[in-house]
Amino acid sequence: MLMKTIAVPISEGRTDLCRWIKKVESGAEVVFTAHGKPKAVLSAYHDQGPPWRVARPDDPKRYGNLQSPVMEEWR
C-alpha cells in the first residue's frame, strides 16, 4: 500500500490536530517540521501481536558462570 506523506509545520499541526489525525486515519503519514526540518511523525496505530519468543530457550550452562564477575568484591 502506497502511503502519502504530508509535511506540516508544528504550529499548524498544533492548531488543527484533529484534521491531521483524520488524514492519518485515511492512510497518510504526517511529518511535523520546524524550520523545514522533520521533528516528529504521526502515523496510524497498528495493534501488535504477542511478543516474539524462541521455541526452546538456550541452555544457560553454555555461557558459564555469569554471576562470579559481578559478585566479586570491589578492589
Image (cartoon, rainbow, N blue to C red):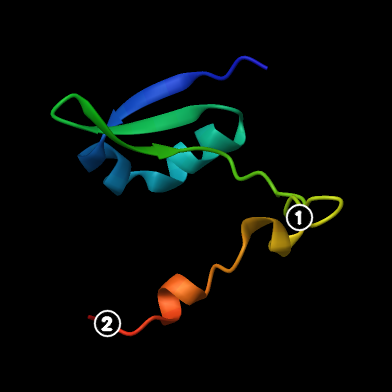
Q: Is residue 24 above or below residue 63?
A: above
| Residue 13 figure quarter | top left
Three-letter code for the amino acid on which mark 1 is drawn: Asp
Compare residues 40 and 9 and report the one nearer the observer: 40
Cβ–Cβ under 8 Å for marks 1 and 2: no
SS class of the residue under badge 1? loop
**Residue furthest left in the image:** 35
Residue 8 numbered mark, or none: none
14 in relation to 39, above or below: below
In this rendered view, identify the residue nearer to me: 30 or 72: 72
x and y, in percent, of residue 18 in the image:
45, 46
Q: Nearer the viewer, mark 1 or mark 2?
A: 2
- Residue that mark 1 sits on: 58
Query: CA gap, disc 1 to disc 2?
Result: 31 Å
As drawn, the residue found furthest toward the right would be 55
Residue 17, position as x, y percentages in the image: 39, 46
Give the position of the N terminus as an image quadrant.
top right
Q: Which residue is mark 2?
A: 74
Q: Residue furthest bottom?
A: 73
Where is residue 61, by image quadrant? Answer: bottom right
Disc nearer the start of the sequence (1/2): 1
Disc 2 is placed on an element classified as loop
Q: Position of residue 75 (x, y in %)?
A: 22, 80
Q: Is residue 51 left or right of residue 71?
A: right
Q: Nearer the viewer, residue 3 or 63?
A: 63
* Residue in the image at 63% along x and 57% along y: 63
Given the image, on which type of amino acid does mark 2 rest?
Trp
Tell me the residue at 40%/23% (across/down).
6
